[in-house]
Every structure is written in structure tokens, then in C-alpha cells.
Image: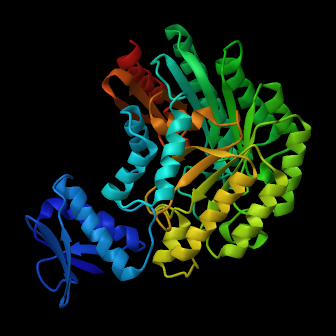
Amino acid sequence: MIKVKLNNAQFNYDVYQMINLFFLFPDIKFVEENYDFNVNVKEEVIEIQKESKIFKYKINKSYKLKEEVKKAVFLYFSKNTTQELPWGTLIGIRPSKRALELLQKGFSDDAIIADFKEKYIAREDKAKLCIDVAKFERNIVNKDKDNISVYIGMPFCPTRCIYCSFASNPIAKCKNIVEPYLEALSLEIKSISSYIKKKKLNIECVYFGGGTPTSVNDEQFEFIMKCIYEAFTENNNVKEFTVECGRPDSITLVKLKSMKKYGVDRISINPQTMNDDTLKLIGRNHSVKDVFETFDMARKLGFDNINMDLIVGLPGEKISHMTKTCDKIFEIKPDSITIHGMSIKRASRLHENMLNNYKFEIPGQDELNQMYELTVNLSKKLNMEPYYMYRQKNMVGSMENVGYTRPGKEGIYNIQMIEERQTVIALGADAVCKVVFLDENRHERFANIKDVREYIKRVDEMIEKKISLLETLYG
């Protein structure tokens, strides 16, 4: 437990956030006595005391006091833990939004970099990343309320990965509810399709994700693909139809042919790592060989826009593992890659095991920084540039998720979803609908029930509530 004395309770959350960056799931308690650290916010200075040593930070009155409190605590722990956290005090999910706002106000690249450094103590390469992403996104981000995207969720997976917290039920234990789920989902698809046609909304992107959409059998996959096609993409000028195929061991030739038949133009094959020992540890059934074979099969069928997801910081992995992964991905040469930082979710089996003192070897900060640099070099070797990025809570090393793409192969849906400037109508168990009010610069959410059996029982209720929310914008 880390015990902190703070003389002003309004900064409790800010201090907590900063300490949380330097320790994995710390138990932080604010106390009046028997403390480890004393944080004293004064008029001109912030003092942090541990035992007899006092760290002093002079307040810059140009910034909000809460930002200065965060900087003081961050600088103190940077000095006393020797960790280099490249994002500084930035903890928001979408740091590129700050860069986009400044670009729109006419700030130069150098001025934006200076702002990130001075205000947030962010490293220059991270500020540049935000600028690059903002410049890529600014001509794609939605500007018309009648442009929408549609998300369809499949809440089943071949197995549940150790780090997963999503609604992804191992399909072997759920075979008796797959058919009822697909029937309920098809009902929601048809109902929402009718609403979209009635309101004459323009569907820009359709994204079929999960879970793992390809975890169902070939016939079930064909059934739901046909439903999606007839409801949303047939006779519509959809810019992008993506299927997150996911794991190579669930992708078959028949499923790939179904995707071709129903107009899918972008797929994602997600190895996460190209090391067989790690794949086994994290609960995946496929091998590195399977990744190569599945990718080759998709290429031969004519898929020319294939994304691959990788994770930095997986349990047990070192720089040598990341080097091997990058080398193998370079051999494959996908059209885009998405680099995810390892995030330890409280609802995951990994977090549960850590609480029970099951030891997982997680890379240290210096090693993580080097691993990320390897992925940046990989993107350059593949002639890719960053096009979207976001951050998550409890990311190992306080890092980020970045999508890199070759020209013209970016995932438009990813940009719209992250920037939150386009309504996304989401269907299926645990799918979250987001209605965007552009004129008011706000959005409202509606989440379908997470439990698959409850979703099946209450799908009519989900449809009704979703349409009620949509009517507040389109009624």
C-alpha cells in the first residue's frame, strides 16, 4: 500500500492518476498520518516529502493548478523510480485530439511539440506521432451527421486469451446458443436496416468484429454474412466493409470465399505475436506456421487489404521475441498493422492470476521502449505511416496503440470510431452504440446486454431502446 498525505483533497484523483502510472495496480490510500509521501500544494510551490527529503516544484501560473500538481508528482516519481514514461502526464485515451485542435488553430509543428513537452512533459517522438496522426485524420474525420458506421459483434472465440476482458465466450462451451444468438442478431440487423433506410442515412463503414466472427462454423458464418450484406452493403455505396477474422485457426477457405462473395474489402488476421511459446502461454491454439498459411490463402483469393494486430509487452516476451515477430511480419508484408500495448484489464484472467500471485514476467520500461522502437522501424520498412492511435488504462509501460498503413489501406472505421465524430450503430451482445451530436460536440451511448443468453431473450428491448436514442438525433 502507498499512503499519501495531501493538503487539498480536490487533487486526490490527479495525484492518484500519476502514482498509478509508475506502479502496476497500486493500492493507494490518502491518510493524515503514518504516510509514505506528503504532497503539499502551496501558493507558489508544490512540495513532496518522503521522510526527511523534500522535492520542490515551482508552480507555473500559466497552467491550471491541477495540471501543475500532476507535473510535480510525475517529476518526483520519474526522478525517484528512474522510469522513462514517454507520454508524461497525458493520460487521456485520445492524445492526438490535442494535436488536431492545435493544428486547426494554426499552430506549427514545432509549437505543438513545445506545448506537449512543456505542459505534459511528453517526449518529442510522442508529440510528433500525435501530429502525424492528426494530419492523416483531419481530411477523413466525419463532418455530416447523416453519415454513419455500423458495427456487428460476435461474442464467441475459439478460446479466451489470458489478457481478454471482452464478451468473448469460448465457443466449445456455447454451441447450444450459437444458433439462437445468430437468429437474434439477424433480427436486430433487419430492424436497424429498416430504420436506416427509413431515415435515408448514409452508411460509410460496416465493421464485423468481436470476439472472433470466424469462430462459428462455415454454414453459420455464411448465414450471418448474407444477413449483413443484404441489410447494409448491397446497393449501398459503402466505402469500407471490414471483417476482423481474428485467429488463423478459425479462418477457413470457405469463410474467406463467403467474405469475397459478400463484398468484404478489408480483413484483419491477428497473430498478436510470432512466437509459438508465447501463443501457447496466452491461450491461443494457432501457430506461427498457421499465420503464414492463412495469410497466403487470403492473398490467393484476392484480398489486397489485410491488417495484422500485434501486442507489445506480452507475458514472458523479451526484445528477442519482438525482433522475431517484426522479422516474420516483414516477411508476410501485410497492408496495415496495428500495434497494441499490453493492457492488463481487471476483468481478465491475467489480472486475476496476478492478484493470486501467479508470477508473469512482464518486460521492464526500458525494454518496452526498445520493443516499441522495433515496431516503429517495422512500419518504416513496410512503407507505412501512422493513421490512428489511442491509449488505454493500465497499459504496461504507459504506452499506446497505433495503426500504421500503406497509402490507401487505412481503416476508415478505426478513425471514425476513435475520433468520435460519427454515429456508430452497434449490434450484438455487449455492442455499444454511440450517437454523435456534431453541432453540440457531444455523444450519447447505449450498450446492449453483455450476457449472450440475456441478449437473446431481450433483443426486442435492445432494438427499441436503440431506436429511441437514435430518434433524439434523427427523429
Q: How many labels does the image show?
A: 0
- Quarter holding the C terminus is top left
* Identity of the residue drawn at 78% across and 47% down: 334
Residue located 71% across and 22% down the image: 229
Q: In this view, does 362 lie above or below 86?
A: below
Q: Which of 244 and 308 is in front in this view?
A: 308
**Relative to 158, is 228 above or below?**
above
Which residue is farthest bottom? 52
Residue 81 against residue 159 in the figure, above or below: below
Residue 228 in view in this figure: yes
x and y percentages locating residue 30 in the rendered image: 19, 73
Depth order, front residue of 335/450: 335
Residue extending farthest right: 300
The residue that appears at 37% across and 57% down in the rendered structure is: 117
Task: Check the image and report above or below for 306 versus 434.
Answer: below
Q: Position of residue 401 (x, y in %)?
A: 55, 53
Position of residue 377 measured from the top left corner of the image (x, y, whole percent):
68, 59
Residues 125 and 198: in front is 125
- Lateral position of residue 232 relative to residue 129, left or right: right
Check the image and tell me how it is coloured.
rainbow
Q: Quadrant of the N terminus?
A: bottom left
Residue 27 appears in the figure = no
The answer to whether 245 appears left or right of 365 in the picture is: right
The residue at the point 64 percent across, 45 percent down is 385
Q: In the image, residue 12 lies at what x, y percent?
A: 20, 64
